[in-house]
Image: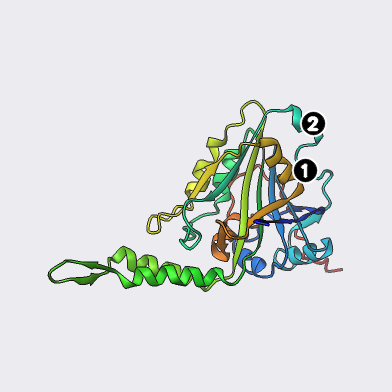
């Protein structure tokens, strides 16, 4: 088989209410380093943004992980398994996938000044939409390929005919440095999807969010692709399934890159339309 199908278990789906005054981005990298199975991180937007997550691990393990790194968050069982029920077949919708422009050896921009979810949720306001990131740890051999790419840039290029010499540009040196640094991090195979429902299902609103991750040194970023079979793609979202090519192209992100796409939001988020909790769950009463 040329494809491997990996799925998170929708029956483990939990609803997470973030604590408004906690840090959101800081714990994300440590949380991701503990991941072992297949996870689905989701933001459902109707009137407010709602955080959902499920995994291939038992639900109790998922709850423990969230509580360990986001102790102030409130965790409950949601009242439905997907943003849309079976009636979505009769409603207009558009599903989009965000994939890497270049081979995964080239890094995305990860040093972003603010929470990227400010741009994502701003694009969601006024729509019924779901943002979904499926991810699972990448095989270790991804690092060796990245290192080989970096070594090629470090060699430079031969310039001249009568008196040839090896020249390495500052951009090539910087790119090689970024690739080597990136190869030292844990990494994940990912699939990123967004579905927008209703007559005004305009996917273009989400381009500013994905443009945040463009790295001009590596010319790496996300491109937005609209799958031909929209119904099948939406069904994969509902099943929380990702298809990984055995020999072909994969989208692999490091823990630094993925943490910008997957984290429980907190005080860094300026958007008001979020299903927050304002009571800290980790504080015990004095009496």
The x, y position of residue 42, in whole percent, is 69, 49
Report the side of 28 relative to 149 (left or right). Answer: right
Q: Answer yes or no: is residue 128 visible.
A: no
Disc sitting over residue 220 in the figure: none
SS at badge 1: loop
SS at badge 2: helix
The x, y position of residue 251, in whole percent, is 56, 57
- Does 125 sit above or below residue 259? above
- Does 34 sit above or below residue 18? below
Task: Residue at 62%, 69% (x, y): give it.
Answer: 139
Task: Residue at 58%, 49% (x, y): give it.
Answer: 117
Instruction: Count neighbours of disc 2 (C-alpha within 10 A) and say few if under 14, some if 14 to 19, many if 20 or more.
Output: few
Please tell me which residue lies in front, 61 or 51: 61
Q: Quadrant of the N terminus?
A: bottom right
Q: Quadrant of the C terminus?
A: bottom right
The x, y position of residue 48, in whole percent, is 69, 40
Cα–Cα span, label 2 and label 1: 12 Å
The x, y position of residue 196, in whole percent, is 65, 36
Please tell me which residue lies in front, 89 or 246: 246
Disc sitting over residue 87 in the figure: 2
* Residue 227, image quadrant: top right
Task: Residue at 77%, 65% (x, y): give it.
Answer: 282
* Residue 128, image quadrant: top right
Name the residue beneath numbered marker 1: 82
Q: Earlier in the sequence, mark 2 or mark 1?
A: 1
Q: How many marks?
A: 2
Q: Answer yes or no: is residue 139 visible.
A: yes
Residue found at the very far right of the displayed protein: 287
Please tell me which residue lies in front, 286 or 123: 123
């Amino acid at each position: 088989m040329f494809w491997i199908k990996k799925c998170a278990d929708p029956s483990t789906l939990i609803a997470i209410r973030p604590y408004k005054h906690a840090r959101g981005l800081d714990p994300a990298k440590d949380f991701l380093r503990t991941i072992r199975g297949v996870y689905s991180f989701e933001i459902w937007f109707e009137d407010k943004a709602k955080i959902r997550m499920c995994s291939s691990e038992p639900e109790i393990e998922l709850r423990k992980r969230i509580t360990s790194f986001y102790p102030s968050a409130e965790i409950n069982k949601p009242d439905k398994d997907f943003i849309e029920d079976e009636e979505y077949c009769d409603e207009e919708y558009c599903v989009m996938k965000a994939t890497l422009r270049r081979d995964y050896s080239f890094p995305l921009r990860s040093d972003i000044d603010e929470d990227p979810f400010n741009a994502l949720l701003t694009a969601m306001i006024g729509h019924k939409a779901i943002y979904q990131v499926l991810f699972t740890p990448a095989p270790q051999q991804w690092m060796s390929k990245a290192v080989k790419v970096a070594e090629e840039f470090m060699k430079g290029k031969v310039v001249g005919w009568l008196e040839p010499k090896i020249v390495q540009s500052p951009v090539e040196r910087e790119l090689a440095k970024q690739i080597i640094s990136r190869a030292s991090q844990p990494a994940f195979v990912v699939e990123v999807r967004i579905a927008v429902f209703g007559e005004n299902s305009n996917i273009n609103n989400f381009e500013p969010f994905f443009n945040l991750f463009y790295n001009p040194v590596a010319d790496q970023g996300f491109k937005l692709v609209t799958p031909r079979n929209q119904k099948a793609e939406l069904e994969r979202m509902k099943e929380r399934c990702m298809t990984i090519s055995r020999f072909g192209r994969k989208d692999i992100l490091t823990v630094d890159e993925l943490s910008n796409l997957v984290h429980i939001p907190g005080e860094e988020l300026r958007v008001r339309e979020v299903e927050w909790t304002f009571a800290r769950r980790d504080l015990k009463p004095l009496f």
